[in-house]
Amino acid sequence: MTDTKKAAPAGSPIDTAYCGQEFTKIISRTATTKPASQIERVLLALLYNGSLNCQEAEHPPVNARHLNSVISELSNRHDLEVDREREQVKGYCGVNCYLTRYRLPFDQLISAKAMVNQLRARRKAAPVNWEKLCSTPLEKLLKSA
């Protein structure tokens, strides 16, 4: 066995430098979090912007290709009420089309915020500071590092 592959001798500076709480601090400083899930991105965008339609959701930082499916999951699996409103927008080549605009009712905001923080905790991201939500860019809130 070569010297580079040997374990550090017991009691050496290399062996004792990273034990216990110090090692945990180093890991927590250097660990990166997973990217935000689609449901977290959509829910945070709804809270950040107030409402969302599928054209807005397809663009960064939300990047939600199938918004209606995510809204359905929020409604059916997570018991969040989501208001739907039909709106006319300019579509391909300026032709008018109808889309659905989604928004969270006021009484659902507390449970939606709690759900965002739960999703962030699962991926080891810091909770959102809701008082300073609009002063922080949405891109930064959804960043994984």
Image (tube, grey):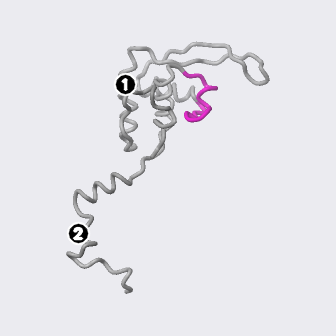
Looking at the image, residue 140 sits to the left or right of residue 8; the answer is: right
Indicate the position of residue 129 as horizontal and vertical percent values. Answer: 36, 30
Observer-nearest residue: 141 or 58? 141
Q: Which range is magenta? A: 52-66
Disc 1 crowd rating (10 Å Cα; few below 14, some 14-19, many 20+) is few
Instruction: Return the residue at label 2.
Output: 16
Q: CA distance from mark 2 to mark 1?
A: 43 Å
Indicate the position of residue 128 as horizontal and vertical percent values. Answer: 38, 32
Q: Residue at x 51, y 30 (%)?
A: 42
Q: Is residue 125 above or below residue 108?
A: below
Q: Which mark is residue 78?
A: none
Q: How many marks?
A: 2
Residue furthest toward the left? 11
Q: Is residue 126 above or below residue 87?
A: below
Numbered disc 1: secondary structure: helix
Numbered disc 2: secondary structure: helix
Q: Earlier in the sequence, mark 2 or mark 1?
A: 2
Instruction: Return the residue at label 1.
Output: 131
Q: Residue at x 40, y 36 (%)?
A: 119
Indicate the position of residue 131 as horizontal and vertical percent values. Answer: 37, 25
Under mark 2, the amino acid is Thr
Q: Residue at x 51, y 25 (%)?
A: 71
Check if residue 58 falls in the magenta segment: yes
Check if residue 87 falls in the magenta segment: no
Q: Residue at x 55, y 29 (%)?
A: 69
